[in-house]
């Protein structure tokens, strides 16, 4: 059976959930081989969880440069492995970095690339959801080793024991003229809430929330529901909430079980990032707000009355 | 410092966007098309860098004849000249082909120190073409910038992604893609709009850019769409007026749906 390369998404060996999803998708196409590119010691930390999710092999590509240079070492290592292992496909996570790795790898090895795939079958046919979920497209790579980035949260992660046999691979040194050096990092501190794209409940606030302080009300509702907090672009632009929580066309795409929109008008660009949510609830004082066109349950009212009452009622019901 | 800005004309996100039934490519005829907002930000950043460091700003696009309007918009903001790669054979090109073709066009502009682009287009959302262009050209790719600084022959960028902020640097020549938070693009002035009419726009066909027809277009793409179907639009459900019990009503709805 052919190998399927999975680029491990990790921070200092701490493996992100999307990697387990990729390993699960990889099993449909062949034998998953995890590729750890990072600082020395990363793979040792990652190995146990990779084995638990079915990695038959773990390629260990470690060096100081692998961690201090942007993207290029990952492309270099994968390109070398595409040459030596002739994999059936290469899977990476469809994050900002993963999409770049995939695109550059495809250029390097002369393959086709598919981005932000939400499903993948055993024949290599990928499903994509485009224009904010307005279209479902099925596509295939027809030239070279398929390079595919998979949207986090789209494929179910399933445990399966794997041997995780280690194999060391070299990290090629990067031409200084082409290298992008990372001089400092300020990682986002996640806090206790689930990640926006992984959460089963998302509570978002819009311009109607009115201030950064008032966002506490959005957070409180999210917290009783065990959910993540999102924001419209207008709320982000007004400085109420940080950019990384923006939902929509130019922000995150979310598809939780439950999406609650507070003080969000429901502009087409916001809907593009949340309209495939299972259930949508909206609170808006304008009965004509377009968000009501897609809400399963809408309350025309003041969010400062309705949201705290909802938070209290849920707490009460939980007893 | 000479700067090339890669700009793309896209269907307006405010209009309904469609794929054609015949070959599943973007239906450009049915939508209003505009210069993608993120590219206005890329042009704005180029103009600010030009104000600080001098040099020329050239905007480059690959797209159908109508894409000239996107170039004119960038010129009216203040860019100096434009190059338009337009050829029927380019229809349906995939990301790899697009990156290779854009790299060829950049090659026709003399003495380029910096290539600027948007981080992600609102139509395809590949989020990769700039990095792929850099890969073809052998340039360092500093993507998702929320701040750009050029200091001698070094470019420094604050890169903002889900992981947080990374402070990165590389040697020029380089490619930088900008994110939504980088700046507020200027509006073209009346004077700018008038001046843009006289600025040079070079239109290149495949042969002019040295691109082999066998390397581009739908028939030679390395990916193919097997099927595409519109999702039925979502419809609204129940809407109630808050009579002092709005929060309780939502809780009842959620409980009935087994969501709490
Ligand atoms: C290229 C492009 C990309 C974009 N990308 C995104 C994106 O990724 N995400 C995004 O969200 N937007 C995006 N937008 C912007 C989008 O068009 C809207 O401007 C934005 O979504 C509006 O945010 P809002 O609903 O919070 O604000 P508004 O449209 O101002 O709506 C605020 C709402 O709050 C209601 N309200 C006010 N006070 C109260 C109260 N006390 N109680 C209840 N309701 C109240 C009002 O009735 C109103 O409906 C994009 C636009 C463009 C052009
Ligand atoms: N056809 C094109 N012509 C010019 N620039 C493009 C084209 N396609 C993509 N780009 C550039 O690449 C950026 C990101 O696009 P994408 O990778 O397709 O999401 C855009 O904002 C443009 O700057």
Image (cartoon, coloured by chain):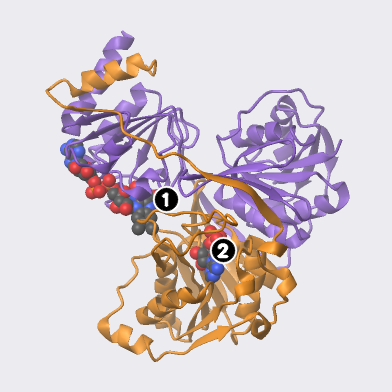
Chain colours: A purple, B orange
**Residue in view at x 34 percent, y 35 percent:** B235
Q: Position of residue B196 (x, y in %)?
A: 37, 86
Residue corresponding to mark 2:
B142
Q: Which residue occupies the foreground of this view, A73 or B202?
A: B202
The residue marked by circle 2 belongs to what chain? Answer: B
Is the residue at mark 2 from the same chain as the one at mark 1?
no
Query: Closer to the camera: disc 2 or disc 1?
Result: 1
Determine the secondary structure under disc 1.
Answer: loop
Q: Which residue occupies the foreground of this view, B252 or B57?
A: B252
Q: Position of residue B155 (x, y in %)?
A: 54, 71
Which quadrant does the C terminus of chain A fall into?
top left
Relative height, residue B53 to residue A3 (above, below): below
Residue B138 visible in the picture: no
Q: Is mark 1 within 8 Å of ligand 1?
A: yes
**Residue in view at x 53 percent, y 82 percent:** B83
Residue corresponding to mark 1:
A249
Residue B217 visible in the picture: yes
Classify residue B221 by image quadrant.
bottom right
Classify residue A14 by image quadrant.
top right
Viewed as shown, does residue B176 lie left or right of B38?
right
Determine the secondary structure under disc 2.
Answer: strand
């Amino acid at each position: 059976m052919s190998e399927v390369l999975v680029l491990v998404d990790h921070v200092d060996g701490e493996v992100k959930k999307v990697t387990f999803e990729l390993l699960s998708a990889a099993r449909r196409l062949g034998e998953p081989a995890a590729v750890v590119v990072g600082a020395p010691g990363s793979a040792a930390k990652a190995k146990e969880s990779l084995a638990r999710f079915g990695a038959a092999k773990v390629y260990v590509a470690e060096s100081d440069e692998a961690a201090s240079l942007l993207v290029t070492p990952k492309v270099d290592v994968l390109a070398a492995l595409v040459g030596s292992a002739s994999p059936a496909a290469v899977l990476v996570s469809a994050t900002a970095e993963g999409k770049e790795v995939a695109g550059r790898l495809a250029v390097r090895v002369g393959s086709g690339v598919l981005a932000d795939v939400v499903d993948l079958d055993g024949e290599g046919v990928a499903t994509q959801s485009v224009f904010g979920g307005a279209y479902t497209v099925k596509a295939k790579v027809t030239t070279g080793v398929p390079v595919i980035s998979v949207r986090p949260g789209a494929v179910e992660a399933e445990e399966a024991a794997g041997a995780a046999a280690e194999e060391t691979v070299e990290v090629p040194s990067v031409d200084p003229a082409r290298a992008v050096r990372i001089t400092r990092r300020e990682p986002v501190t996640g806090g206790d809430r689930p990640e926006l794209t992984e959460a089963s409940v998302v509570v978002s606030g819009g311009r109607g929330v009115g201030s950064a302080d008032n966002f506490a009300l959005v957070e409180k509702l999210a917290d009783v529901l065990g959910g993540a907090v999102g924001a419209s672009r207008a709320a982000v632009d007004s400085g109420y909430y940080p950019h990384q929580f923006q939902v929509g066309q130019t922000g995150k795409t979310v598809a939780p079980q439950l999406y609650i929109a507070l003080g969000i008008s429901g502009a087409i660009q916001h809907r593009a990032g949340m309209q495939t949510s299972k259930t949508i609830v909206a609170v808006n004082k304008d009965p004509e707000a377009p968000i009501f066109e897609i809400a399963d349950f809408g309350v025309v009212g003041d969010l400062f009355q309705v949201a705290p009452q909802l938070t209290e009622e849920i707490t009460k019901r939980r007893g | 410092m000479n700067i090339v800005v890669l700009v793309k004309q896209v269907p307006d996100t405010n209009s309904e966007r469609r794929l054609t039934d015949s070959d599943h490519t973007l239906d450009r005829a049915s939508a209003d098309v505009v210069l993608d907002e993120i590219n206005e930000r890329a042009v704005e950043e180029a103009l600010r860098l030009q104000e600080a460091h001098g040099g020329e700003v050239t905007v480059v696009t690959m797209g159908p004849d109508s894409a000239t309007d996107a170039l004119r918009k960038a010129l009216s903001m203040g860019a100096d000249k434009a190059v338009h790669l337009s050829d029927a054979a380019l229809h349906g090109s995939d990301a790899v082909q697009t990156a290779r073709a854009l790299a060829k066009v950049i090659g026709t502009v003399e003495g380029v120190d910096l290539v600027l682009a948007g981080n992600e287009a609102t139509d395809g959302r590949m989020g990769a073409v700039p990095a792929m262009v850099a890969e073809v050209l052998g340039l360092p790719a500093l993507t998702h910038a929320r701040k750009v600084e050029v200091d001698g022959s070094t470019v420094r960028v604050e890169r903002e992604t889900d992981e947080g902020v990374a402070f990165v640097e590389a040697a020029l020549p380089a490619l930088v893609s900008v994110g939504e938070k980088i700046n507020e693009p200027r509006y073209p002035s009346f004077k700018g709009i008038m001046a843009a009419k006289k600025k040079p726009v070079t239109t290149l066909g495949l042969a002019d850019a040295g691109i082999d027809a066998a390397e581009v277009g739908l028939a030679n793409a390395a990916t193919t769409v097997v099927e595409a179907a519109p999702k039925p639009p979502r419809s609204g459900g129940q809407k109630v007026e808050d009579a002092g019990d709005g929060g309780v009503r939502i809780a009842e709805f959620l409980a009935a749906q087994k969501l709490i």
